[in-house]
Each structure stands twice: as C-alpha cells, then as structure tokens.
Image (tube, helix red, strand yellow):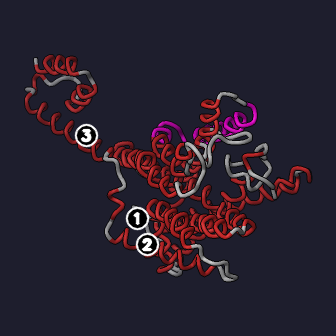
Amino acid sequence: MSGSQSTRWEAIDAARGIAMFFVCFAHFGSGYFASIGEPARQTLTDRIGMVASPTFMLISGMMLGMLASARSPARFAPVRDKLIDRGLFLLLVAHPVILLAHLTFDMGHFAWLRWGFITDAIGIALIAGPAIVTRLSMRARLVMAAAMYAASWWLVLAWLPESLPVRFLKDTFVGPMARSTRLFNFPVFPWLAVYIAGSSLGEMLQRRREADARSAMRLLLVTGSTMLMCAAALHLLLPHSVSDAWSPTGDIFDRVADLASIFQKLPPGPMYLLAFGGIGLMITAGAIWIDARGIAPRALAALALIGKSSLFVFVFQYYLYFVLLRALHLPSIRWWPAYYTVSMTIVYAASRVWMQYDLNRYLTVGYARWRASRALAIRQLSDALAQLIPASHTPTAPPDTIVAAWAEQPPSRARASTSTAAR
C-alpha cells in the first residue's frame, strides 16, 4: 500500500518486522557468544536488541487504539474476540512451546516454572486491553498507564515480602527488588502500562492517518524524538554518581533496580523506556515515511512479511538460536555478522512459507470462533422468536435482547422467561 488506506497498514507491519530483527540480533548473541565464551560481545548484542521490547509493546498497543477508534462498538466486538483469542493462545500454547527451547539450559529444579517471556505480558495485555480501550477515553488511559507504571515501581522498591510464594507473585507482576525468584520474565503491570499508553497513541495516530499519512508520521517522529531528548536531558541533569548507572555492572537482579539506568529493562525503568521506546517510535515513523514515498517497496514488503508472521518468527528464532546454534558450536570468527545474516535469511524464508500457506489461521484456541457461533445462534433464535410472537403481543424489548438475556440466565430461569414472553 503506498500511502493508501487499508485494513492493515503495511508500514506498521514493517516496523514490527524491524523490531523482530532486533529480537533476533539479541537472541543470536545469547545463542552464539554465550556458547563460545565471549560475554562482552553478548552484552553488546543484548543492549542493541533492547530496542525490540518497548517497540513491540508500543506497536501492539497502538494497533489496539487504531482498531478501536476506527470502528463502532458493534464492529469492534469481533476484533475484541480475536485479540482475546490471540492472548489466550500466547499464554496457553505459545508459552509452553517457547519453554521447550529453554530446557536445553541447565537451570536447576523447577526451571520450567521460573521462565517467563514477553509473550506472557502481551497475552495478558491482549485480554485486558479491549475492555480498557472501550471503557476509558484516550486521556483516561494515559492517566491509568502512568499511575500503573508509578505504582508498580513503588511496589518494587517498597514492598519486600519474605514469603517465597508472595515474592514469586511480586516478581511476576511488578518485578524484583534484588535477586528474583524468576529466571527471566517480563513483569506484567509495567509492561501493561506501556501497552495502554500505546493504545492512546494509536488513537491519535488513527485520527491523523484518516487526514494524512504524513501527519501520522510527524506525530510519531515528534513523540519519539521528544522521548529521546528527555532521556538525554535527564542523563545530563542527574548527578555523576547516578549517571554511572548508564553502564551498570553485575547481574541486574543482584542489585537495587536503578531507575536512572538506560539499560534497566526488567522491570523497565523510565530512562530505558524513554530512550529505546523513543527509538522504536522513530523507526515506525521512518517506515510510514518510506511507505508514503513509495521508496524500496520490496524491502518494505519483506519487512512487513516478517511483521505479519511475528509470532511464528518469535517462536521459531528461539529454536534456531537456543537449540540449533548452540548445538552447532560454530567457531569464533572476526566476521561473525555473517552468521547473523545467514540466520536471518533462514528466518525470512521460514516466514515466507508460513505466510504463503496462511498458517496464522491456526494460531487460535477457538475462543473467537466460539463467540461468533454464539452470536449467530442468538441472532437466529431471535429471528425465530420474532416470527412466533404475534405483532399485537410484541414485547417492549427487541427479540434479540430477550434472547441475549435468556442466554445469560440459568436454564430454569431461562425457560421461565421464555414461557412468560410467549404468553
């Protein structure tokens, strides 16, 4: 689509695809450099890849805001059901599949319970997000996101439970203070706050898009650059003793979570979100600009292909880097980016086959299909009820309202209500 309106915005899919390149780069470093004992280069790839998480979460939230603002409540209902379906899939299916790729790491007892992934936070966001976006205004969501983010960090710093189960819940939902009970996870509440904030930005983006794609691009460019400038200004204004956190040393879970560190990812610190989130928004703005200008359409389409198959790519790359790459024990070479290039060629080929056969349709637990079948059954029953009831005895409430209420009642009450309506 070159600057045109469509159901899917190819530029957003392309930005999602770029985010997946950063994901793969970080995990390539974890799979390759960790296996050959080069922690310095692994740290480099990890930090470059840090742009992926806030970019992906913001884009996901923006898509929710755009979808909700472009549709009436009735037209948004099927979209809501699909989002909830995908969220359930991430939690119930994607999580254990990704977990299998991590079992190659020897992490001790109950390691399977202690692993967490960004797909878990996104899954919860996809389930909760539609209800939030349909009930709260754009500004109310921004206030909610800010309050949730601030409260989660207050709990991280001030709440110090001693009970192991309570510590596990704290680390899962708000993040750890020192040593975490989780091997790795994305705390739910701060990342949900980022997602909700992204939905407000997406609503503004949709309004700009309806007027002019370039206006939407400027919104993201200004927002992203402002975030970056705020991060730079805070770095200059903070005392040197605090700004040293720009280069933190040691395990992130072995020290007090540093709000001033640009690399404070788990839980996400404000400097980290301002810097890497700002970069992510500027990348998205660049994708929109390239799309509107019609520049490099094949490259944009290739990135969009990876973006559309991002869930498959996310799962696939774990097996590519954490299982296959670690098993190959490739030698250390000076031109190691060649390994990464080859791996991304494999990722692109796999995603192309995935999209060619439309395999995204299998990424479901059946919730959306069940909701659609239920809605169809209610409509058919209401039509039948409308034909059975004489016009002179038509109840004040529409038949579909009666049927919907009947469907929510216990069987005995539902039968009684139907008999009363018939009389």
Residue 289: mark in rendering = none
From the top left corner, tell me how far across and down residue 275 is, in percent: 72, 58
Disc 2 crowd rating (10 Å Cα; few below 14, some 14-19, many 20+) is: some
- Give the magenta range: 131-159
* Three-letter code, disc 3: Ala
Q: Give the residue displayed 88% in from the left and 53% down from the top.
A: 237
- Give the label on residue 1, or none: 2
- Residue that numbered label 1 is attached to: 6
Are circles 2 and 1 on residues that touch, CB within 8 Å? Answer: yes
Q: Is residue 115 visible?
A: yes
> Can you identify the residue that label 3 sits on?
375
Between label 1 and label 3, give the one nearer the viewer: 3
Earlier along the polypeptide chain: callout 2 or callout 1?
2
Along the viewing direction, whichever of 201 and 343 lies nearer the viewer: 343
* Cα separation between marks 3 and 2: 33 Å
Q: Residue at x 54, y 79 (%)?
A: 342
